[in-house]
Image: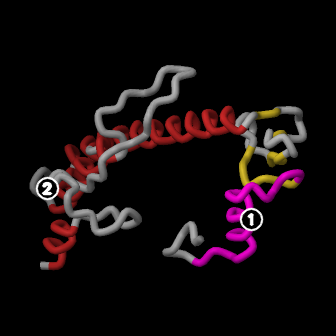
Amino acid sequence: MARHPDRATPDIIERDFDAQERGERRNRLSTYPCPDYGGALWQFDDDDFGCHTGHRYAPDTLLVRETEALEAALFTAVRLLKEKATLLRQVAAKAASASESAARLREQAAMDDDSDTLAPGRRAPSVGKTTSLKSPKRCCTRCGGRRMTSTANRRCSARTRQSRT
């Protein structure tokens, strides 16, 4: 099963991921990194995972750690989008208010500031608590996300049509 249908993935990588999904990588390197430092994890006969520095994880513990890492990355992305939007507005304020470049900067800031598309109404999770990552698919405020063209593209079909005219 292809993980990235929009790009070519070497067959050996696909075979490794498929074997991992089927549980066929016992006593071999897994496709997962150690959550503590990012090195390789081996999968043992008892289905636990371990690294060469001695960290050991049960599958459910590894899943929790992966979820926490994903949430941290998402909230970092949201924070960076907000910071970028603020900086774009600051730069746009210094540009001539009627100039085309200032308008483009303000438009980019508005798109970056709409970080609710990544994590709608979410606050940073408390330490040790795993929260749900389910979020509705949205692409812009114009259509409220009802016109997603694809999950990979995440572009509004209304916005795409408008930009072509």
Residue 31 locus on image (x, y percent): 73, 55
Q: In front: mark 2 or mark 1?
A: 1
The residue located at (52%, 23%) in the rendering is 129
In three-dimensional space, the C-alpha distance between marks 2 and 1, rounded to whole angstroms, equals 42 Å
The colour scheme used to paint the residues is secondary structure
> Which label belongs to residue 130?
none
Residue 35 locus on image (x, y percent): 70, 38
Outermost top residue: 127
The residue located at (78%, 53%) in the rendering is 30
> Which label belongs to residue 142?
2
What stretch of residues is rendered in magenta?
A: 8-27
Q: Quadrant of residue 20?
A: bottom right
Magenta stretch containing residue 66, yes or no? no
Report if the CB atoms under discs 2 and 1 are less than 8 Å apart.
no
Residue 85 locus on image (x, y percent): 30, 44
Q: Which amino acid, mark 1?
A: Asp
> Which label belongs to residue 16?
1
Graded by Cα atoms within 10 Å as few (under 14), some (14 to 19) or many (20 or more), the crowding at tag 1 reads some
